[in-house]
Image (cartoon, helix red, strand yellow):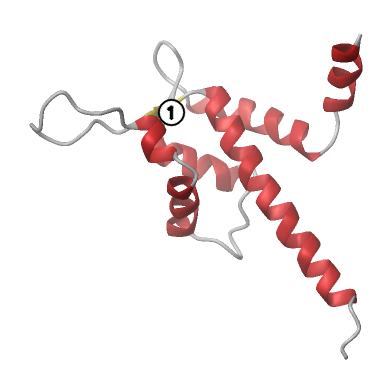
């Protein structure tokens, strides 16, 4: 019973809209079995679906946040030998949706802080 209530509550709001936009754009970009996109396409997707504000962030900023939150560790398992570079990581739909949720949360928090600081009286 709890899951039905939780599912109904989770189906609205900015996070569900973001998940839907990510899924739609992912479907256009994904190739292979299982469907996946490159890390460069992930960064582009984050800008295209609107979870990253291009007015306040650039690609290096997005990559920095990804790395700080463990993207490299998750996508680059240890190599068997030291020959050559690691293949570029591929990212699935669920991972894209999780990263988009992280960036959306960060953006909403920044907007909330900006709004609260504008409304605060100056002492």
Q: Quadrant of residue 112?
A: bottom right
Task: Compare residues 15 and 49 and report the one nearer the observer.
Answer: 15
Q: Kindly give the residue lying farthest to the left in the view shown.
A: 83
Q: Quadrant of the C terminus?
A: bottom right
Where does label 1 land, which residue? 37
Q: Quick one: SS at disc 1?
A: strand
Residue 92 at what x, y percent from top left? 49, 23
> Residue at 63% of width from left, 57% of height from top?
53
Identified at 42% across, 19% down, the residue is 31
Give the camera-side residue of 95 and 49. Answer: 95
Residue at x 63% of width, y 26% of height: 24
Q: Residues within 10 Å of mark 1 (few under 14, many from 20)?
A: many
Examine the image and state in which quarter residue 118 appears.
Answer: bottom right
What is the x, y in percent for residue 62? 49, 52
Query: On the rendered image, what quadrant is the N terminus found in?
Result: top right
Location of residue 109 with respect to 82 vertically, above or below: below
Q: Establish if 58 lies above or below 43.
A: below
Rendered location of residue 101, percent (x, y): 65, 38
Along the horizontal axis of the image, is 44 left or right of 87? right
Q: Position of residue 51 (x, y in %)?
A: 65, 47
On the picture, is 65 further left or further right than 118? left
Quadrant in which residue 54 is drawn: bottom right
User: Which residue is pictured at 62% across the width and 26% down the height?
Assistant: 23
């Amino acid at each position: 019973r709890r899951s039905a209530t939780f599912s109904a509550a989770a189906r609205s709001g900015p996070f569900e809209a973001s998940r839907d936009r990510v899924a739609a754009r992912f479907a256009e970009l994904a190739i292979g079995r299982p469907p996946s996109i490159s890390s460069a396409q992930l960064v582009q997707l984050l800008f295209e679906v609107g979870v990253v504000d291009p007015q306040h962030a650039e690609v290096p900023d997005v990559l920095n946040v990804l790395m700080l939150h463990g993207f490299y560790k998750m996508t680059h398992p240890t190599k068997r030998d030291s020959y050559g570079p690691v293949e570029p990581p591929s990212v699935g739909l669920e991972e894209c949706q999780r990263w988009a949720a992280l960036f959306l949360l960060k953006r909403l928090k920044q907007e909330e802080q900006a709004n609260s600081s504008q409304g605060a009286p100056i002492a």
